[in-house]
Image (cartoon, rainbow, N blue to C red):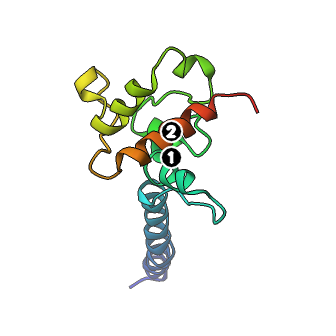
Amino acid sequence: MTSVAHLRVVRLRWLAIIAGPSAVLLIGSMLAIVFLPHPVPRNATAVQRTYFKYCAECHGADGRGSWRATLFALRPGNLTNPRTLSGLSDEYLFNLVKHGGAPIGRPGMPAFGYHLSDPEIRAVVDYVKALSKPR
């Protein structure tokens, strides 16, 4: 084997040693960012914990929408904008959270009636409505 051919083999081996683990780490990091749940602050109230666990993935921690939702071409709306929720009754929002959006023409919103009790849903609706109020 000539020295030039030997150098090429050595370069390819080193490239595989460096690029292989780097690619695995990069792909693993991207998957973790997309699929791990939103972190919940330690000082969060019960309703905030519920919001972070079930809603923040699409609506974002602050209600302005999440880049994860954008990644999957979902448009959850800006819950901090007063016009987003104006004119929507508490009962409408309760049914939207409990039964999902498909029965009323909003197929992107999943149903949470199996995961949350009625009082928890009402608390989340109140919390979401409070996001749009000026502070």
Which residue lies at the image location 43% right of the left edge and 72% below the top edge? 20
Expressed as whole percent of the image width and height from the top left, the position of residue 110 reads: 31, 39
**Amino acid found under the numbered disc labelled 1:** Ala
**Amino acid found under the numbered disc labelled 2:** His
Expressed as whole percent of the image width and height from the top left, the position of residue 99 reads: 27, 35
Which residue lies at the image location 31% right of the left edge and 29% below the top edge? 101
Q: Is residue 74 above or below residue 40?
A: above
Which residue lies at the image location 43% right of the left edge and 69% below the top edge? 24
Question: Do residues under tags 2 and 1 come within 8 Å of each other at their CB atoms?
Answer: yes
The image quarter in which residue 63 lies: top right
Residue that mark 2 sits on: 59
Question: Helix or strand or loop: what does disc 2 sit on?
Answer: helix
Q: Label 2 to label 1, Cα distance in Å?
A: 5 Å
Quadrant (top left/top right/bottom left/bottom right) for the C terminus: top right
Quadrant (top left/top right/bottom left/bottom right) for the N terminus: bottom left
Is 97 left or right of 69, judged from the image as shown?
A: left
Expressed as whole percent of the image width and height from the top left, the position of residue 106 reads: 32, 24
Count of numbered labels shown in the rendering:
2
Which residue lies at the image location 54% right of the left edge and 57% below the top edge? 46
Residue that mark 1 sits on: 56
Observer-nearest of 69 and 119: 119
Is 39 left or right of 122, judged from the image as shown?
A: right
Q: Is residue 93 above or below residue 58?
A: above
